[in-house]
């Protein structure tokens, strides 16, 4: 039992012995001293298998200002953290890297910047074109695409950096690769994922991919070399 990690949302007779110690170890490797709340959650919106993105989510609790890491129950059906602790540590280290680098704050700033640019640009076009709705719409679409591409480019950089941090801090690239492969097997059979895969591909082709594919992430980990 550790004081800087609290696990919430447990059902009656539901236990994950050693999970708090495992997360505490990851926190220490990143030098994070703030308390971390763990919420064990369901994600009915993603069906029985759940999307990869839904397995880990994190945010700041506005009441306590503690960082909250949400882990869906589906993750524990995929990763046995008792038998394979480094697999779970690597996945959690990826999320803790986002927390450490305040990636959520950076993403929000990019959105705000482009929202302000869109308002200013639309105002200029409105005045210059004497309220031509087509030109205003076209201007907003172009600003939106530029903003989305910049946002997604930055997110890709964040994801790659978080993967690298996980490999460096946990020191077991193979375990991280195995964990990602287990997630991929679940993800590719997810009916929700398959239903929107084609539409998502078209959208991503226009605005750029915000996340590296599982295959790309696994390959990047395989190619990673420790700095000399």
Image (spheres, helix red, strand yellow):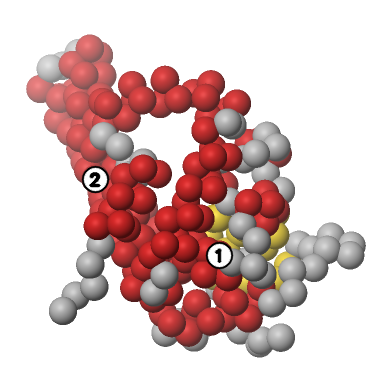
- Of residues 168 and 125, which is closer to you in this image? 168
Q: Is residue 162 left or right of residue 81?
A: left
- Where does the image place residue 21, in percent across and percent down from the top left? 63, 81
* Total labels drawn: 2
Q: Residue 50's mark? A: none
Furthest residue toward right: 12
Specify whether residue 158 is in view.
no
Specify whether residue 84 is in view.
yes
Which residue corresponds to the image point at 58% horizontal and 40% vertical from the top-left? 186
**Foreground tag (2 vs 1):** 1
Which residue corresponds to the image point at 39% horizontal and 74% vertical from the top-left? 171
**Would you place residue 204 above or below residue 180 in this image?**
above
SS at circle 2: helix
Q: CA distance from mark 2 to mark 1?
A: 27 Å
- Where does the image place residue 30, in percent across and percent down from the top left? 41, 79
SS at circle 1: helix
Mark 2 vs 1, N-terminal side: 1
- Of residues 2 and 191, which is closer to you in this image? 191
Q: Quadrant of the C terminus?
A: bottom left
- Of residues 178 and 98, which is closer to you in this image? 178
Q: Is residue 42 left or right of residue 33?
A: right
Q: Residues within 10 Å of mark 2 (few under 14, many from 20)?
A: some
- Where does the image place residue 29, in percent across and percent down from the top left? 43, 82
Residue 103, by quadrant, is bottom left
Which residue corresponds to the image point at 70% horizontal and 60% vertical from the top-left? 40
**Would you place residue 118 above or below residue 75 in this image?**
above
Q: Quadrant of the N terminus?
A: bottom right
Residue 166, by quadrant, is bottom left
**Would you place residue 121 above or below residue 52 in this image?**
above
- Where does the image place residue 134, in percent across and percent down from the top left? 22, 12
Residue linked to disc 1 = 88
Q: Residue 153's mark? A: 2
């Amino acid at each position: 039992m550790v004081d800087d990690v609290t696990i919430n949302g447990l059902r009656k007779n539901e236990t994950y012995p050693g999970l708090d110690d495992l997360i505490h170890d990851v926190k220490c490797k990143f030098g994070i001293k703030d308390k971390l709340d763990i919420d064990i959650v369901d994600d009915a919106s993603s069906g029985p298998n759940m999307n990869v993105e839904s397995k880990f989510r994190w945010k700041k609790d506005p009441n306590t200002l503690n960082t909250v890491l949400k882990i869906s129950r589906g993750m524990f059906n995929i990763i046995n953290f008792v038998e394979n602790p480094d697999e779970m540590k690597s996945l959690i280290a990826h999320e803790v890297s986002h927390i450490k680098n305040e990636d959520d704050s950076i993403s929000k700033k990019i959105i705000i910047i482009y929202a302000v640019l869109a308002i200013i640009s639309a105002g200029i076009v409105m005045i210059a074109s004497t309220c031509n709705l087509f030109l205003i719409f076209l201007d907003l679409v172009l600003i939106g695409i530029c903003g989305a591409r910049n946002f997604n480019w930055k997110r890709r950089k964040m994801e790659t950096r978080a993967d690298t941090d996980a490999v460096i801090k946990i020191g077991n690239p193979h375990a991280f690769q195995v964990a990602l492969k287990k997630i991929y097997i679940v993800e590719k059979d997810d009916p929700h994922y398959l239903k929107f895969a084609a539409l998502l591909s078209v959208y991503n082709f226009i605005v750029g991919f915000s996340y590296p594919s599982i295959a790309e992430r696994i390959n990047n980990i395989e190619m990673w070399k420790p700095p000399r």
